[in-house]
Amino acid sequence: MQDYRQIFLKYIGQTSPEPMMLDITGAEGVFLHGPAGEKYIDLISGVSVSNTGHRHPRVVRAIKDQADDYLHLMVYGEFIESPQVRYAEKICSLLPPGLDTCFFVNSGSEAVEGAMKLAKRFTGRTKIVSFNNAYHGSTHGALSIQGSEQYKNAFRPLLPDVWQIGFNDFSSLGTIDSATACVIVEPVQAEAGVIYPVPGFLRELRRKCTASGALLVFDEVQTGFGRTGSIFACEKFGVTPDIIVLAKALGGGLPLGAFISSYGIMSTLSHHPVLGHITTFGGHPLCCAAGLAALEVILEEDLAGKAKTKSDLFRQLLVHPAIKEIRGDGLLMAAELNDPYLAAKAVKNAPRSGIILDYFLFCDSAFRIAPPLVINEDEIRLACERINNLLELVSGK
């Protein structure tokens, strides 16, 4: 079997000086397979993408069936394509009233860009408010509202009139005023290390946006589709945004994003000017067919409802002196360690223990645990045994 490592380094654009360099030749359920028989438990789901696991039979079948009908036909929004229509109808049926019009794109970053444009177009305002330690993507507009200077400074100038405030800081909500087009927030801050809103914060944020005429945008790219124990986190917290942004698990393992709002708000992108937002491949029929099949699995198997019980089992079994706390409710968790240097060591050495872990962009003292929602009890027990052994190895205890 050909060794692709050197070819990978030569021809593939790199995102860091030290990529993981795992050669994966197959995947099934919660397991990834290497060319020499290696078998890893995937505890990150491609960063909250593979909620129904790898190659779920219903998802694969939906992709094959759609491929027999047609692939790309026309730029998004011109032809009636049943996979888009059926999937949009299903998603909107699960969202609160007022979130009833779906604009499909290709990724989370593009969905964020579309949401920002929509907010500016609808309100006629320019000011955008986001939060410290927030992550919304890496295109120029999405990068502008990211909550870390570390990743932004090398690419300035960025989008003007962006203001950043503190998550869970009620006093900072005064920044939201009559000049604000939108406030964009992750209902659970994922890359900050799975930080939940304190009681009442999202409700007060909603109240402040309503009073000022600003649109409230929920970035549910990581929290959507059962990850936190409900299909969408807005349901979990009882707060309805004006726009919701989706991606990652939206495509069932294929690339897909969306921003969803009311018909009245969304329709402003269709005129003055026409083609207010354009995407060639957004809502690709293969991706929509895969996403709909995956969502049906999540609903029929109650994977969102079962996520809390599975999360509790992780907490019960992950017992090691190196673990300070485990944050998260559902299968988006952060294992905070007593020694901040151990998290990076754990992530780097995890494959040797037969598991895949990941770090957080804005929390270097914790590692991510976000397995496919289909993970079963036996797999959780095996994963926790391997994590505990890994911590024993890297901490020397």
Image (cartoon, rainbow, N blue to C red):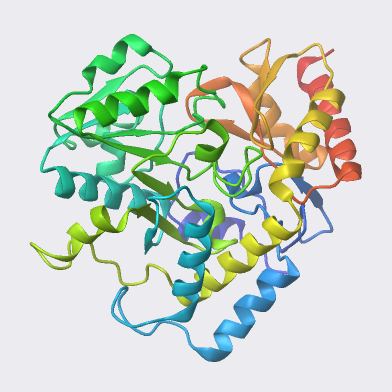
Q: Residue furthest front?
A: 97
Establish if 308 lies above or below 304: above
Q: Which residue: 56% across, 65% down?
A: 291
Residue 213 left/right relative to 243: left
Q: Is residue 131 above or below residue 261?
A: above
| Residue in view at x 37 percent, y 67 percent | 282
Which residue occupies the foreground of this view, 53 or 302? 302
Which one is nearer the viewer's eye here, 1 or 35? 35
Residue depicted at x 35% and y 39%: 217
Q: Is 35 or 157 nearer to us in this picture?
A: 157
Foreground pick, 303 / 25: 303
Percent of width and height locating residue 310:
79, 37
Q: Is residue 18 left or right of residue 344?
A: left
Residue at position x 68%, y 57% in the image: 299
Q: Position of residue 262 (x, y in %)?
A: 32, 53
Residue 352 showing in the rendered view: yes
Q: Position of residue 95 (x, y in %)?
A: 49, 51
Residue 372 is at least partly visible in this image = no
Give the position of the N terminus as an image quadrant: bottom right
The quadrant holding residue 343 is top right
Q: Is residue 61 left or right of residue 15?
A: right
Up-down relation of residue 397 to residue 140 (above or below): above
Q: Is residue 233 above or below residue 166?
A: below
Number of marks in the rendered image? 0
Q: Quadrant of the C terminus?
A: top right
Which residue is situated farthest in the left direction here?
272
Determine which quarter of the picture holds residue 267: bottom left
Residue 175 image point, x, y percent? 22, 18
